Image (cartoon, rainbow, N blue to C red):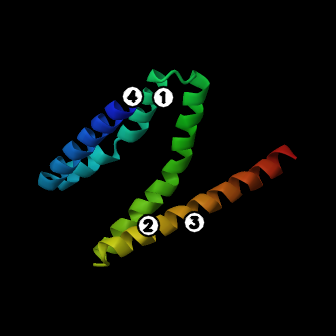
Amino acid sequence: MYLLAKILVSALIIGVVTEIARHFPTYGGIIAALPLVSLLSIIWLSVQGESSESLSKFALGVLSGFPATAVLLLIVYMSLKQSINLYVSITFGISGWLIFLIIQQHLKDFLKTILFD
């Protein structure tokens, strides 16, 4: 039952956001940038009985993924401004996202080594 409710609510939100974006692209982008998926996920996890510690770790994971997501969106934006095909722009963005995540993880490991050894 939870699965069906999650799918319906999530689909409804995506549908509303894309309709707003069709008529008001800037406002649609602002709404899409809201942490709707993150907050919905936290709510669904909580409803399903996850502990506060688990929710906290999830929120930290979302936060650590934020810089890479910003890089992805920046690359897609810049690619589209240069009239690069949408799917190629998205591929570039995802590639940049993945590279940034790898660099971020190596930097995190490096800093842990320096600070705690």
From the image, tell me which residue sits under label 4: 2
Q: Position of residue 24 (x, y in %)?
A: 15, 52
Q: Is residue 95 above or below residue 40?
A: below
Residue found at the very far front of the displayed protein = 1
| Mark 4 or 3: the one toward you | 4
Asked if residue 35 can be seen in this view, the reply is no
Residue beneath the point at 39% across and 33% down: 3
Tell which of 47 and 69 is nearer to you: 47
For the residue labelled by badge 2, is the local secondary structure a helix, a strand or a loop?
A: helix
The amino acid beneath tag 3 is Ile
Query: What is the distance, in whole Å, between disc 4 and disc 3 at their CAs?
Result: 35 Å
Q: How many marks?
A: 4
Work out whether mark 4 precedes mark 2 in sequence or the reverse, and give the earlier one.
4
Residue beneath the point at 57% across and 66% down: 99
From the image, tell me which residue sits under label 3: 99
Work out whether mark 3 precedes mark 1 in sequence or the reverse, and give the earlier one.
1
Work out whether mark 1 precedes mark 4 in sequence or the reverse, and give the earlier one.
4
| Mark 1 or 4: the one toward you | 4
Position of the N terminus, as image quadrant, is top left
The amino acid beneath tag 4 is Tyr
Query: What is the distance, in whole Å, between disc 2 and disc 3 at their CAs?
Result: 10 Å
From the image, tell me which residue sits under label 1: 45
Cβ atoms under marks 2 and 3 closer than 8 Å: no
| Mark 3 or 1: the one toward you | 1
Query: What is the distance, in whole Å, between disc 3 and disc 1 at their CAs?
Result: 29 Å
Work out whether mark 2 precedes mark 3 in sequence or the reverse, and give the earlier one.
2
For the residue labelled by badge 3, is the local secondary structure a helix, a strand or a loop?
A: helix
CA neighbours of label 3 inside 10 A, class few (<14), some (14 to 19), many (20+): some
Work out whether mark 1 precedes mark 2 in sequence or the reverse, and give the earlier one.
1
